[in-house]
Image (tube, rainbow, N blue to C red):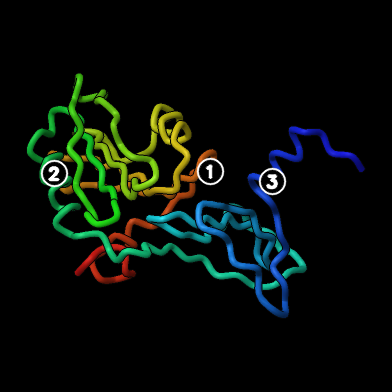
Amino acid sequence: MTLSPRDLAIQASLPILPVPHDGELPPLPLGQRRLLLAADGLYLEVSAPAMAATLRLAEAALPYGPLKQRLVLPHGPLPAAHLRGLAERAKATPQQEVAGAVVWAAGQGYQLIDPEVISASAGHISYRDTLDDAGLVLDLHSHATGPAYFSSTDDASDRARPGPYLAMVLGRCDGPMELALRFVSAPFLVPIPVQLLSPGAHGLVAA
């Protein structure tokens, strides 16, 4: 079988491997990703300077080896103060959406980013996007008093970034706040339990 240049490029950028029953998979080099066929389905594995993950994309009974999901921040958990700062800003202005991010940079650690807002209302926010994709760990915006969910606009925005990173939406900012969380490695958008951001519980947020 002769593959087209397009198919060769796709397979080179996103190879697919079966998980062995015996032995181990070859290590995934930094900055790359691949699909894995495991006993319980199809997984995405990503290795980046600020984040590494192995997450299931689809369930299926397959004749391959077992695999466990994982989500790792190699430089340590996110500072809880950064998440509190983002939530407090959203609660302080529940009449309009807010946006923010947490990025990691060598020698500087995790930094809380407050972007320059161009316009904002109860239904939208627009800001000057100067975020460093290579160091982006958490991209957040609020839905003002609306529910926490990812809209079609959010989907398009997340797929415009290469990832990997975590995307979070804060909703009901005028009362008990709602959260929605997912892992992004375009074009894949993988829902993540918000409990992963509970301080100290899973290593993603400092206690």
Q: Is residue 105 left or right of residue 164?
A: left
Q: Is residue 156 above or below residue 183?
A: above
Q: Which residue is mark 3?
A: 12
Residue under the image location 32 percent in, 64 percent down: 75
Give amino acid for label 3: Ala
Q: Secondary structure at mark 2?
A: loop
26 or 126: nearer the viewer: 26
For marks 1 and 3, the one nearer the N-term is: 3
Mark-to-mark CA distance, 3 and 2: 48 Å
Mark-to-mark CA distance, 1 and 3: 17 Å
Q: Is residue 73 above or below residue 133?
A: below
Q: Which residue is mark 2?
A: 175
The circle drawn on residue 188 is: 1
Q: Secondary structure at mark 1?
A: strand
Give amino acid for label 1: Phe
Which quarter of the rendering shows the N terminus?
top right
